[in-house]
Image (cartoon, rainbow, N blue to C red):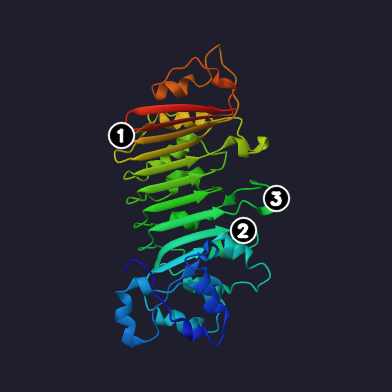
Amino acid sequence: MASILVFAVNSLIGQHPNGLENSLEHSYPHDATWSEYIRITMVCSTWRQIALHTPKFWTPLCFLLLVRSAHFPEILSRSGVAPLRLRITPSVLYSDSRAPPIPESRLAQLFDPARLLELNLYVDKCRRNILLESFPMGKTPLLEIFVLCKDMRVGGHLLEEYLAIPHHILNFPRPSIQNLLIELCHSPWESAASIPSYPNLVHRTLSQLAPTIYVVEVLRIINLSPKLEHLALFNDPTLLRQLHRPSLRPPDDPSLHADLPRLATLRLTGDSPFICGLLSKISHPPSTSLRLVCKGHWPAVNGLHPYTSLLDLVGLTTANPLYSASTVSLQKRGHSMASSAWY
């Protein structure tokens, strides 16, 4: 079963006589701020089998209402062993500032490694420990979608610090993962060799990697997923503090390449060395759609165009003074390539 089942709203009406009905009725699917929910089975056993085959009638239940409900044990028991889609989004974090803390015991029950099908986990500075420590320390055989993002609004700055990922989150086998998105995180990327392969992963997005990560390490991570069809790597240098940028890079490994024969789309954002280093070592079909966004200011070197190496990789030559541009964007679909620059 590809989704979690529905819970009959009337079992909570006694506890939330108006608010729950109104919240569910008016916020989903019209209000995106209520996107976090868990779907639980119907209460009435007579209609249970009907509900299983009619997902269009399933009702979403807000995560916060569920996890703090007095009926939580009963609700979870009625859900049986149905797979769980758990979404803790920024709207949960900010709508919850004055509420009592989330019970750790209930989080542990919801982070059931045998039942998790999808996990969208956005963490802020206040709740990072409880949410990350609740992540199951073991194999998650059903988990297909995993999103882990650090909230970017803490402290009033976009990038105050990176999220340190506990080793157990990525160290256990995740054999069913097909979609993985990691944003504003570091470690254990620095020890990619210790991360298990994701053999069925087809969509990987790594956004704003820690600036201490090097191209060779990214390539080792990519090589863990040979079936990749969609790959996006974003490392915007204009968002990083100067003190965050590494001054030294490890020696290049000429033997290290990533062979991605199924790659359909490739999105790279970063400075010229980052993009060129990856693009020159990723083998992909000619039909792969490329989107390259090169950001930052770099002077010409030895009289050469500063983007010569990048343009050579994609088969372009230019006499335009792109070295003064803050962003250079290259996009390729099939065998055609277009370029543009923003100042």
Q: Earlier in the sequence, mark 3 or mark 2?
A: 2
Mark 2 surroundings within 10 Å by alpha-carbon count, few (fewer than 14), some (14 through 19), many (20 or more): some
Q: Is residue 31 above or below residue 343?
A: below
Task: State the image coordinates of residue 292 (x, y, percent, origin top left).
Answer: 46, 33
Number of marks present in the image shown: 3
What amino acid does circle 2 point to? Asp
Q: Which residue is mark 2?
A: 124
Q: In the current view of this chain or complex, which residue is farthest to the right?
A: 155
Amino acid type at image mark 3: Gly
Q: Which residue is mark 1?
A: 287
x and y, in percent, of residue 321 in the image: 55, 17
> Which quarter of the rendered picture does the N terminus lie within?
bottom left
Marks 1,2: beta carbons within 8 A: no
185 relative to 283, above or below: below
- Nearest the viewer among 219 and 62 is 62
Depicted 105 relative to depicted 157: above or below: below
Q: CA distance from mark 3 to mark 2?
A: 13 Å
Q: Which mark is residue 156?
A: 3
Q: What secondary structure is marked by label 1?
A: loop
Which of discs 3 and 2 lies nearer the camera? The answer is: 3
Seen in the picture, residue 90 relative to 314 is either above or below; the reply is below
Measured Cα–Cα span from mark 1 to mark 2: 40 Å
Q: Is residue 324 visible?
A: yes
From this viewpoint, is residue 254 visible?
no
- Identify which amino acid the numbered label 1 is placed on: Ser
Callout 3 secondary element: helix
Identify which residue, 283 or 28, lies in the foreground: 28
Closer to the eye: label 1 or 2: 1
Rendered image quadrant of residue 296:
top right
In the visual, does 19 lie left or right of 317? right
